[in-house]
Image (spheres, grey):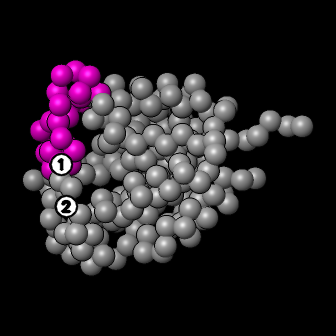
Amino acid sequence: MPAPEYKIVYLTGPPASGKSTLGSALAQSVHPLMWLSYSRMLSEHLAARGRNVTHDRLRSESSSIISADDINAVDASMIQLIEENKWSTHIIIDSHAVSRERYGYRATLFDLDKLRRFAISFVVCLYAPPEVICQRIVDNHDGRPLITLYEADFHTYLQAEVALNYGLICQVPVYFLDSQLPVEDLVQEVRRRLVV
């Protein structure tokens, strides 16, 4: 009997698109599955260095709090976790490279070597209309800056460009999923791509 083929999924999308909701639902319904939340790993990294930063502050002031050394350390930890676990579980990398800052936007992309070491099987990019994104942020602020419809739309396009580029570089499919769908439907869409 052949060994199971486990997949590594890069899950992305703009803030309030439902990445954490989908990641959590996948972790509960797909087994075995390791869910690596970049923001959670970053918070843990900062806390381990005595820099206890709230999730709200991390979201609203990321460029003034997070250094290139912090990002490189979290990237190295993520690569190590992937390399240690990729033969025994599916892995979801929950991350978004584009962040809204007080001056505009910042993109902190994985370099080619890191992308290759992640060995991504496919990319999932969540999206929703700007009105929905803005309303979700109002309803659950959680440190996210309030944004205009234009900014929500622009952020979605920037993040989609990152997803497409990662897919092109890794030569893997990119799936754009409408996060207005029920989370159970989104789980099914990802789950069916995990099973060969």
**Left or right of 70: which side holds 169?**
right
Q: Amino acid at mark 1?
A: Asp
Estimate the x, y position of residue 171 in percent, counting from the top left: 60, 49
Estimate the x, y position of residue 40 in percent, counting from the top left: 34, 39
Estimate the x, y position of residue 109 in percent, counting from the top left: 35, 43
At horizontal 15% and vertical 65% (from top left) the residue drawn is 146
At horizontal 18% and vertical 22% (from top left) the residue drawn is 50
Question: Label 1's element?
Answer: helix
Count of numbered labels shown in the rendering: 2
| Residue receiving disc 1 | 56
Q: Amino acid at mark 2?
A: His
How packed mark 2 is, by other alpha carbons closer than 10 Å (few <14, some 14-19, many 20 or more), is some
Quarter of the image for residue 5 reads top right
Q: Is residue 149 above or below residue 97?
A: below
On whether residue 76 falls in the magenta region, the answer is: no
How packed mark 1 is, by other alpha carbons closer than 10 Å (few <14, some 14-19, many 20 or more), is some
Question: Label 2's element?
Answer: loop
Magenta region: which residues? 45-68
Specify the farthest residue to the front: 28
- Quarter holding the N terminus? top right
| Residue receiving disc 2 | 141
On whether residue 57 falls in the magenta region, the answer is: yes
Is residue 153 among the parts visible in the rendering? no
**Left or right of 16: which side holds 143?**
left
> What is the CA distance from the residue labelled 2 to the residue labelled 1?
8 Å
